[in-house]
Amino acid sequence: MLGFLSFVLIVLSVLFFLMGYAYLTDKAERLMMWSFTGKVDKVTDKEGYKKQQGKNSILMGIIFFLVPVSLLLVNNFETNPKLLYLWLFVLAGVTITNAVQIRKYF
């Protein structure tokens, strides 16, 4: 089960890295700026928004890559597994920070 979770997290990491690359290099703009609600159409500074989302996607890719590494380190060195809960706080902090930062683009 732990191996499957690590595999899924690494796949998510790769997807976030690819999304970050696409945002920062203006690849697949129609796909990246699509939304269900149409809220993205109201973006005032499109370039700033894409740059912010690109940075956030790369940061999320780093987080999703480091979680399986942390799981491996906890299992190999028998450290306290409760330290892995720190990743929840990091993920929540990054998500809240991104939500606050993208508000200025609408």
Image (tube, rainbow, N blue to C red):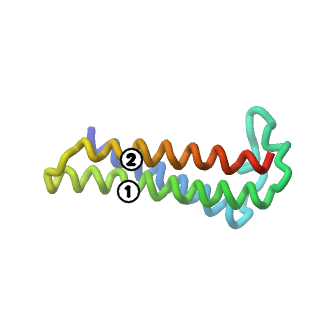
Instruction: Give the position of the C terminus as an image quadrant.
Output: top right
Residue at left offset 70%, top offset 67%: 25
Closer to the camera in the image, 53 or 85? 85
Dot 1 lies on which element? helix
Please provide percent x and percent y for residue 85: 33, 42
Residue at left offset 24%, top offset 54%: 72
> Are dots 2 and 1 in contact, CB under 8 Å?
yes
Question: Badge 1 local density, few (<14 within 10 Å), some, or many (20+)?
Answer: some
Residue located farthest toward the top when viewing the structure as drawn: 37
Query: Which residue is denoted by mark 1 in the rendering?
Result: 66
* Amino acid type, residue under disc 1 in the picture: Leu
Residue at left offset 82%, top offset 48%: 43
Instruction: Give the position of the N terminus as an image quadrant.
Output: top left
* Amino acid type, residue under disc 2 in the picture: Trp
Q: Which of marks 2 and 1 is in front?
A: 2
Left or right placement of residue 24 versus residue 82 in this view: right
Distance between mark 2 and mark 1 Cα atoms: 9 Å
Left or right placement of residue 3 versus residue 64 in this view: left
Dot 2 lies on which element? helix
Q: Is residue 34 above or below residue 28?
A: above
Please provide percent x and percent y for residue 44: 85, 51
Please provide percent x and percent y for residue 63: 44, 54
Closer to the camera in the image, 15 or 98? 98
Residue at left offset 76%, top offset 59%: 48
N-terminal of the pair, mark 2 or mark 1, is 1
Please provide percent x and percent y for residue 61: 49, 56
How many marks the image carries: the answer is: 2
Residue 87 has which mark?
A: 2
Residue 85 has which mark?
A: none
Residue located farthest toward the bottom when viewing the structure as drawn: 25
